Amino acid sequence: MGLGAAALGSLLNPTQLLGNNNSGILGAPHHAPKAKRIIFLLQSGAPSQLDLFDYKPLLNKMNGEQLPDSVRQGQRLTGMSAGQSSLPLAGSQFSFKQHGKSGAWVSELMPHTAGIVDDLCFIKSMHTEAINHDPAITFIQTGSQIAGRPSMGSWLHYGLGSDNENLPAFIVLVSKNKGGQPLYARLWGSAFLPSKHQGVPFRAGADPVLFLSNPPGIDNQDRGKMLKYLQRLHELELEQTGDEELTNKIAQYEMAYRMQTSVPEALDLSDEPEWVFDMYGPDSRDPGSFAANCLQARRLAERGVKFIQLYHQGWDQHLKLPAGIKVQARETDQASAALITDLKQRGLLEDTLVVWGGEFGRTAYSQGKLTKTDYGRDHHPNCFTIWMAGAGVQAGVNYGITDEFGYNVVSNPVHVHDLQATILHLLGVDHERLTYKHQGRYYRLTDVHGHVVKPILA
Amino acid sequence: MKAERLRQYGMAVTIGLSLLGGCGPRYTADKQVLEQLPQTVDYNFHVQPILSDRCYRCHGPDENAIEGNLQLDNQQGLFKKTSSGLKAVNPGRVSTSEIMARITSDDPDYMMPPPSSNLTMTDLEIATLAKWIDQGAEWKPHWSFIPPVATDLPEVQNTEWPINGIDYYVLSRMEREGFQPKSAAEKEILLRRVTFDLTGLPPTIAEIDNFLADESENAYEKVVDRLLSSSSYGENMAVGWLDLARYADTHGYQADFYRPHWRWRDWVIKAFNHNMSFDQFVTWQLAGDLLPEATKEQILATGFNRNHAQNNEGGIVEEEFRVEYVADRAQTFGTAFLGLTMQCARCHDHKYDPISQKEFYQLFAFFNNVDESGQTTFYQQDLPGPTMLIPTETEARKLEQLKSLSTDKKNEIKQYLEQKRETWDYSHLANIIAEPKGLLAHYALERPKNGHLTNQMISGVSGRIIDPVNSKLAETPPQEVEGAIGKGLKLSGDDALSFPGLGRFSRWEPFSIGLWIKVPPELKEGVIFHSNKGSALYTYKGYQVSITGDQLDVRIAHNFPYNSIHLLSENKVPRERWVHLMLTYDGSSTAQGTRLFLNGELMATETVRDNLFKDIVFHPEQPGQNPPVDQHLKIGARWRGKGFTNGEVDEIKLYSRELSALEVKMVSGVAIEDLHQQHKESILEYGLANHDRYYQQLSSELQAIRRSESQLIEQIDEVMVMDEMKQPREAYILERGVYDQRGEVVQPGTPAAVLALNEVTNSDRLGLAQWLFDIDNPLPARVTVNRYWQHYFGSGLVKTADDFGSQGERPSHPQLLDWLALEFIASGWDLKQLQKTMVMSATYRQSSAASVEEKKRDVNNRLLARGPSSRLQAEMTRDLVLSASGLMVDKIGGPSVKPYQPAGLWSYNAFSSKYQQDHGDDLYRRSLYTFWKRTNPPPSMNIMDAPSRSYCVVSREQTETPLQALVLMNDPQFVEAARVLGQRVMKEESTVQGRITLGFRLLTSKKPSKPQLELLEDQFQQALLEAKHDPNKTGAILTTGEYDVDNNLDISELTAYAKVMSTIMNFDATTMKR
């Protein structure tokens, strides 16, 4: 039962409470958006581009030889491999093949992704500034390496508002039990933007949003009754004081009550047919897994959630890369590909942007000893590969080229700020014009940098 | 046409002319706009905000970003001739002022601001500039840089209303703008407001009743005095200070480990409660360590500047983050005390305020002289230095005793030595033995088998050649070479000779380690031997001898750099030949007791650091280390650091004693007969150590005392503080703000536009504190009174409490701000007096109720024609329900506590320990004691707008979201409080009405109205009926939380009351402060 909705309907705009002002601060986008929403599949820890997408046969030929100084060019290394007396090049142990009409190279680790390359736009020339996880993931999420700036989702929420009045506009899903490099609340935090713009983590289990569930002994009906009394109490106060702010308070509770139904409904997979689970893979039946989260992401996209942020930890293969990356690829490959296919089948890919990638790349040389069967790779900011798909992005494209060592970008570099500018552009936002005045300065996601990567736009 | 209109509304003709002569008609100053213009246009209040926001980015203080050679931020620039021949601003002549032509143009190549800037100017802004020029364009320095000016209290018509000075200023503006003040708030509402504002807690029923009953004239003042002297006052004041000081219980960044820093918080609470004067309060925090004969308390206060986040992520570039910490201190200083955005001058000159990049780094230079590490330790038990020990009284007493025992013992040894020096038989050397006593191990390194190194000592520990990355046997054995004696090994720098179980020494244990080495010509950096783990990752805990450049680098460290002994050899290390190297250490924790010998000769060394006061071993038995660190001697390589690449080693010997100089010579191969020629002192040293039982006994007694002392100190709490390096670190302008792009060297200094640093002032943090509170400094008093004003009125007189610069808001009541600032200074920076003045004012006591029309006239209450109202902040909301239910545990200070928190929140961080929820009293402490994890702050507080505590914040946001409603309805802390409150009212009152009224009063401080009471009674009866009819549900709500249910009470009734109390808890009158 909608709690007094009729009586209050004229008074409220409940969307404003979740910060879901339909139009956001911009009122309307700066230009016609190609994407209405975004699903960001952040692969935390930094997947090795050299073992997944950026095929470098020269590394296999020169396996064990030293990284030439002419390639490294004095590039700073992390304290984890800077002490090594040798930086032996490490060829990938995984075989690569070209796929699809686009002829994209994909290694054997990603068979499902290989099957959808013609829907994807690979950017092989990504580069960043940070060489360590905390600053790098903070950078790709907030445009700054140091805590204190709003996350991309918060910016978009602030600028564009929401398309669903019953769900938060910015939702975060983290693969469970992964360990690996930590995640931080600041990655979906709103920093100096009002806190209603921060991402809301949805968690697997009984209480998907913090404090969403009623305490023991209170069911939905009880809550409804209690809220009726509360509403009446507020109305009495309103009658007495004429304080209009009370209508806001009433709306706040109405919205909370609606969320108590709409969130579990959005997350309830019981109406998904068998073939959907089959498509996303067996993990998709395990709540909280990456595959289940991908399926949830599609459901949230269907419901008009603006920014759906997934995190999958565990890509930080400093040592024993071949064993570690296999597990990671197995956990993510099928579901990532299924998400694209699923969105496409439902016509959602047309206005949904999907981004897959980590916070930086990994080194062409081995961290630790290179053996016949084993190697590790350290952090590498100079180049890494991500892919994008969907709304407004060209499909079947390979953009940017790295050198034969997979160490430096040789053409069409894409800086993290460029990626951010491009994502905003696809959502109809000019990254230079979505600003917030804080401490005297007009801040923006891309700081004072960033260029839209026009060649990849459809 | 426009000229016509302008004339019509009383503007000078010249404006119109200029507009016609401009480069395009864009300007339509209609009546509405003109009506909004102030009578007299003031540069500071009306003009500069426009110029700053729209022009300064290219025509402002940043010397390197000036377009068209035009600066509009200073007097010279504004009135200068531009390239067009016109002055930028021609006073009185709008038509010949270049800026007017530009801002009214619509030619994209000519107009200002240019389209590419994404900035525009409104008609009102254009008209404002025009009128200012027309009125003669009077220029003034930026308002906040002019020292506060004393004014007479303004005349007011309604002389009945004002209570103190504040009210005259406020009323004067109200009257000017046609407003009337509100009458005083109802007593209960006022009492609730002032009690929350001063103590963060609600008034008790007795306090409400007393106040209601007290009809004396000073009834309210008595309340204020009572509240100001209650200890809850200090706790409440601390909350805002913790935001400002970015206090948290964890380090932040990647691993985000625990940091016990609560003693500093305790000090803050205490300082507020003792009403320490604000200048002293801040001086101690900035420079307590530099005060003459600084006390422990003064040093503890400096923990303020250690509150920033610190990074221990493996592999980071050390200097990058050290610079970040120093910049954070400078930024915090700017925001908190100057209300300036100093950080905007970190990469280039400030775009808006007269702060050059050089001045940022001059301020930076004050905070740069801390012997700290940018990469802090990954060992959870250790606190990043500088630190100070905080012994309990018992510990302090024991420590004193041990110190004096140790001194006595050293004197005794010295005296014995003196005595023996006279009587010793120096010719008697027959007892010299080839091998000194105490040998623990000897590795000749002859033909290692399967990576194993044989110990020449029978039943000694054998070594292994390992890859320190994974501690597995190295795949490639080191090359066998001609050694110093027999064969030796040539090392790769990546594989280490490792001796598990050997060489884990505490700082009280003497030891000696010697070996032959051959240093390759090219090696610039590499470790020879060590007992560290991961070098910088664990801040060199243990001992090491390495090569740094051409020097030998000795470190014996608890936590490098601060807590360590650090020596550098004065002479270059010989290369390409075998030399014998020996480190001896006497267990004294001093540089003096640490000696390095080359070929048997003592090396001259420079003492870089001599400050070892905690142990140098990992404690594997302590929690949090998984797996425990196996600390032992390793040679030639280390995990995460450079090794002895291509270096050769041979004949490793390790002793459990400090060898005497004579013995070192023996070990290094100097022939015995040559030893006979030794100086008497060496012979005495050797003889006593080896042949004098009494001397040996004294030595071992001293060692036992040192051991006790060390073990005691390991137990003593430690706290991070500031400690000035004796030799200040060089500070530079960092180009583009990048840590390694060093430009010009800078000396400590202050922004000249605010106030130049007095020449007689010390250029250290104490000097900076003195500068801050210099009577001529225009900012700190204003900034501080404004922040407290914000606390009481919801918003500062300057709304941007963190920005008093050009881009900040102008004060709503500038003369009041100055009056408060001057009163504050005159009172001796007395915070309680300042706040008493605020809450005693009629302005503060006004009712906050206002009609829709009244609110519309002044949405943000800038005129203060009504009382303040706001949502209770996160801490107050939780403390209210704890207090109302009687759950609140009234205890001040101590370590942070972990109340209820949904499971799994910390699992995003695999380095974090699990959230171990506390029990009993610790569930019910005031919220300022709730454990604050930076990367994952307490969720309910986060939802209720508490900041992340990662950086200095002086104003909290206020938002309304349904998530807040969910907290109040469902967070176990609130559900439990509701049912315990139900229990309380059942016990304290006997009727339904009485019980509901009591609960209502405890939460809202007022009595319910008749209809409200009836409504809640109805809810109670309904709930009771349901409870009785549905036994399954009855009592279920009572299972939330750990507090005991009183089984003597009727469970159905209690269930029903719990629901009613929860309803009231969610009521506006509970959650709002009005």
Image: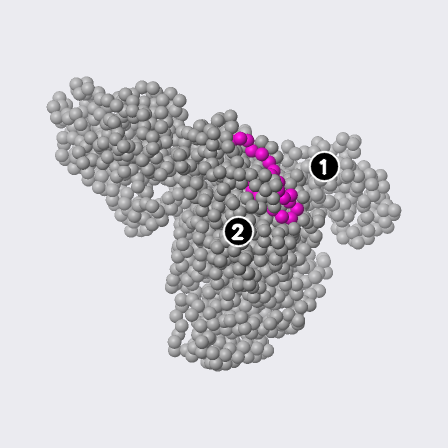
* In this view, B254 is above or below B736: below
Q: Tell me the amino acid under the disc marked 2.
A: Ala
What's the magenta region? A385-405
Of B1029 and B427, which appears nearest the observer?
B1029
Of B454 and A397, which appears nearest the observer?
A397
**Chain bearing mark 2:** A
In the displayed structure image, the side of residue B162 where residue B240 appears, left or right: left
Q: For the C terminus of chain A, which image quadrant?
A: top right
**Residue appearing at x 48%, y 31% in the figure:** A59
Inspect this view and state whether residue B1065 appears.
yes
Q: Residues within 10 Å of mark 1 (few under 14, many from 20)?
A: many
* Figure disc tally: 2
> From mark 2 to mark 1, how far is it between C-alphas?
62 Å
Of B893 and A58, which appears nearest the observer?
A58
Q: Tell me the amino acid under the disc marked 1.
A: Leu
* In this view, A413 is above or below B1044: above
Question: Which labelled disc corresponds to residue B478?
Answer: none
**Residue appearing at x 25%, y 42% in the figure:** B707
In the displayed structure image, the side of residue A62 where residue B14 appears, left or right: right
**Residue A349 placed where, x, y %?**
63, 51
Q: State whether discs 2 and 1 lie on one chain.
A: no
In the rendered image, which quarter is residue B432 located in? top left
Q: Which residue does the numbered mark 1 point to in the structure image?
A: B78
**Residue B1014 placed where, x, y %?**
56, 79
